[in-house]
Image (tube, rainbow, N blue to C red):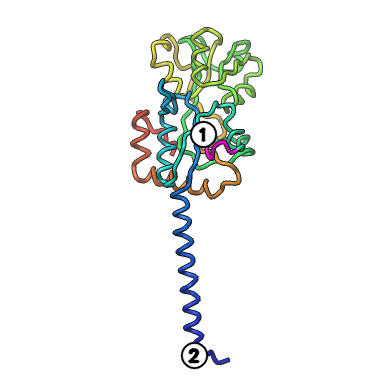
Amino acid sequence: MVKHPFDHTRETAVIRKILIAAAFAALTTTSALAQQALRIGVEGNYPPFSSIAPDGKLSGFDIDIANAVCAELKATCTLVQQEWDGMLPALNARKFDMIVASMTITEERLKAVDFSDPYYDVPSRWVGKVGSFPDVKPETLKGKKIIVLRNSPRAKFVQDNYKDSEILLVAKETEVYMELAAGRGDIAVGSSVVSSEGFLKKPEGKGYGQIGDTFRIGTGGGVGIAVRKTDGDLKARINEALKTIRANGTYKAMAAKYFDFDISGS
């Protein structure tokens, strides 16, 4: 079959139109993203990751991460303060579009939501009065009261492994150490960072210390940004934003404001 002499010209014109349309679509997508308004769920009771000043201003490492990711997404973002227990239901009810609240990635949570790549990972630690226990074996803590944040991987870890101990579940990580200092428990388990910065380094932590070694709960997931399972595109863009702030030094500079060690988990 002999081609019409104008076929090549027509094909070129069609291809040009397709390329122009694709470029316009890309520009439209970028423009839409730039104009996008996102709501970010944060907690505010987990220093140094998040805290609320008397004037209502939020600050902390989680807050900085939320703002940095938002800047990379080129979106207009609003921080929505939410109590810990209601975080996942509020996300799926569309009260906000993502959660940046030191939420550990676990198999159980992955049934309800999806997560970005981890943006930090720190071990847990046991805290009690200095010299109170030689170790933290289940038999050693039999009959003792353990304080832990409810609805957390640490709570599940304690409930699964310390069945002969009494467990006091509290609503906020800061309350773990308040209850311990008040004598309403024998030993506590929490974040190695929060227990140190929020309790052990403060006057109220005098006489208390780490019991046993730090440890990581066997999820291996680290801490990620939670999104709805239907928001795969948002998750992908968040992951790109996290890669960018790690590569350009933003992450390191933010982390240095709060920690004197590598929190990245890399």
The one of 192 and 230 positioned closer to us in this rendering: 230
Q: Is residue 123 magenta?
A: no
Q: Earlier in the sequence, mark 2 or mark 1?
A: 2
Who's the residue at 51% across and 12% down the image? 180
Figure quadrant of the C terminus: top left
Q: CA distance from mark 2 to mark 1?
A: 62 Å
**Mark 2, other Cα within 10 Å: few <14 / some 14–19 / many ≥20:** few
The image shows residue 61 at horizontal and vertical percentages of 41, 31
Residue 162 against residue 132 in the figure, above or below:
below
Asked which secondary structure carries label 2, the reply is loop
Looking at the rendering, the stretch of residues picked out in magenta corresponds to 94-103
Figure quadrant of the N terminus: bottom right
Who's the residue at 59% across and 29% down the image? 86
User: Which disc number belongs to residue 107?
Assistant: none
- In which quadrant of the rendered view does residue 218 lie? top right
Query: Which residue type does callout 1 highlight?
Result: Gly
User: Which disc number belongs to residue 41?
Assistant: 1
Mostly what secondary structure, the magenta segment?
A: strand
Q: Which residue is mark 2?
A: 5
The one of 130 and 167 positioned closer to us in this rendering: 167
Query: Which residue type does callout 2 highlight?
Result: Pro
The residue at the far right in this view is 163
The image shows residue 91 at horizontal and vertical percentages of 58, 36
The one of 87 and 117 positioned closer to us in this rendering: 87
The image shows residue 11 at horizontal and vertical percentages of 50, 80
Who's the residue at 48% across and 67% down the image? 21
Residue 175 against residue 99 in the figure, above or below:
above
Asked which secondary structure carries label 1, the reply is strand
Count of numbered marks: 2
The image shows residue 40 at horizontal and vertical percentages of 49, 37
